[in-house]
Image (cartoon, rainbow, N blue to C red):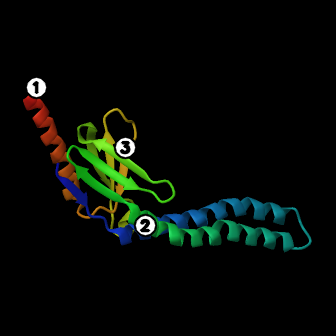
Amino acid sequence: MQEIEFEIDRNAVKNYFVAVWVLLCFCIPAFLFSPIGCLSLLEGQQSGFITIVVILSVLVLFLIIPSIFCLWLCPQQANNLRYRLEGTTLRIDGGVFFLFRKSIPLERITDVALVQGPLLRYFGIWAMRIQTAGSAQCEATLYGVRNPEEVRESILSQRQRIDGEKAADA
């Protein structure tokens, strides 16, 4: 069986993962701090000491610690990604703490959608969503594949070839 490994722009994927983490680190404190800060100010406390403690706690818990953690985690995530075609199967490997290996038979793939939102566009990468028969949501998302149009065509043509072989055998 022939194996085709898809090339990944790991640096761009790492930067994308970091950006997602940073956005989460800024959004969570914004949602948590707004009600806490407003309530402490509305209560008419004599000193702002409690407000300052709350602000510093939120910053440390939801901004500084996750940011330091993401500087280690995101490169690990990007380096552990692997996408390949092995005969009649699309194989996807990844993960850091919990490794995963997913196998999707090509005969089940119904569509390969290329998606690029504003953040993905900024980093110059595409998300490739694999749709399968019998599933309401996408089966897998491949980030940062180089030449995504060619990879998409490769997957779909390999699937059509398999379908053609099955029809000829029947």
Disc 3/disc 1 C-alpha distance (Å): 28 Å
- Give percent across and percent down for residue 147: 23, 63
Q: Which of 104 and 99 is in front in this view?
A: 99
Disc 1/disc 2 C-alpha distance (Å): 46 Å
Residue located 49% across and 54% down the image: 98
Q: Which amino acid does label 1 sit on?
A: Ala
Q: Which of marks 3 and 1 is nearer the N terminus?
A: 3
- Determine whether the residue tagged by mark 2 lies in a helix, strand or loop: helix
Residue hosting label 2: 16
Q: Earlier in the sequence, mark 1 or mark 2?
A: 2
The quadrant holding residue 144 is bottom left
- Determine whether the residue tagged by mark 1 lies in a helix, strand or loop: loop
89 versus 127 height, above or below: above
Residue hosting label 1: 170
Q: Earlier in the sequence, mark 3 or mark 2?
A: 2
The quadrant holding residue 126 is bottom left
Residue located 34% across and 52% down the image: 92
Disc 3/disc 2 C-alpha distance (Å): 21 Å
Residue hosting label 3: 139
Q: Nearer the viewer, residue 164 or 121?
A: 164
Q: What residue type is labelled 2?
A: Tyr
**Residue at the top extreme, as displayed:** 170
Q: What residue type is labelled 3?
A: Glu
Residue located 69% across and 66% down the image: 61
